[in-house]
């Protein structure tokens, strides 16, 4: 984030504080505009990243054709409708087609897309489509479970609700056995 953008965010935060009836010059709020600007720099850093940067050279030729799954990937995002957080876990599986990706790259892909203003549905699609793009695997499965503060703090105010979205491509969509294996793997809990 450049200095002008950071300055703009500080000014907007001061305006917001005044608009809700607060005094931006009150001692406890004096540094709030700066803190908010820095927070948004972190929360929106996904816009500064590309799939190519994230993956780098971490795709490898490998004669492996069984399911690869990375589950319980924590994510934090911001709802584009209310600018309130939603967070949860993503579960990602794929079946290679002659190429594998470094396992740490999958959580990095989740992180890149979650650090943008989002809808959970779009986040789920973007994760799956990214793996399809870089690996061209036999298939990809993605399940995202999210807790949305826009549902819990306002609106319907249902504190125990969460949303689940899925995206299945290739054999994850066309082969029930593959789909079942993926769901069974992500349902397994560690002791």
Image: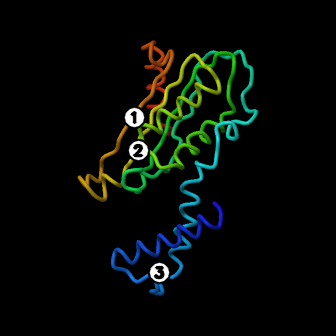
- The quadrant the N terminus occupies is bottom right
The residue beneath circle 3 is: 29
Q: Secondary structure at mark 1?
A: strand
Residue positioned most to the left: 156
Give the residue displayed 40% in from the left and 44% down from the top. 146
Q: Please give left or right for residue 81 compared with residue 33 in the image.
A: left
The residue beneath circle 2 is: 146
Tag 3 near tag 1, CB within 8 Å: no
Q: Please give left or right for residue 84 compared with residue 169 in the image.
A: left
Q: Picture coordinates of residue 144 (x, y %)?
A: 44, 37
Q: Picture coordinates of residue 162 (x, y %)?
A: 34, 44
Give the residue displayed 45% in from the left and 19% down from the top. 179
Q: Residues within 10 Å of mark 2 (few under 14, many from 20)?
A: many
Tag 1 near tag 2, CB within 8 Å: yes
Vertically, is 23 above or below 70? below
Dot 1 or dot 2: first in sequence order is: 2
The residue beneath circle 1 is: 165
**Front: mark 2 or 3:** 3
Tally the marks: 3
């Amino acid at each position: 984030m450049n200095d002008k953008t950071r300055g703009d965010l500080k000014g907007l935060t001061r305006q917001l504080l005044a608009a809700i009836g607060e005094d931006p010059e009150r001692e406890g709020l004096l540094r709030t505009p700066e803190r908010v600007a820095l927070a948004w720099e972190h929360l929106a850093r996904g816009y500064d990243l590309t799939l190519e940067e994230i993956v780098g050279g971490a795709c490898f030729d490998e004669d492996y054709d069984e399911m690869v799954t990375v589950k319980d990937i924590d994510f934090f995002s911001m709802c584009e409708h209310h600018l309130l957080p939603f967070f949860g876990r993503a579960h990602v599986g794929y079946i290679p087609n002659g190429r594998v990706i470094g396992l740490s790259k999958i959580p990095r892909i989740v992180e890149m897309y979650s650090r943008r203003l989002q809808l959970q549905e779009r986040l789920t699609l973007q994760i799956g489509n990214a793996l399809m793009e870089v690996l061209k695997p036999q298939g990809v499965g993605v399940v995202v479970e999210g807790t949305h503060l826009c549902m819990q703090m306002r609106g319907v105010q249902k504190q125990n609700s969460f949303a689940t979205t899925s995206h299945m491509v290739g054999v994850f969509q066309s082969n029930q056995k593959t789909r079942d294996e993926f769901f069974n793997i992500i349902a397994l809990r560690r002791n």
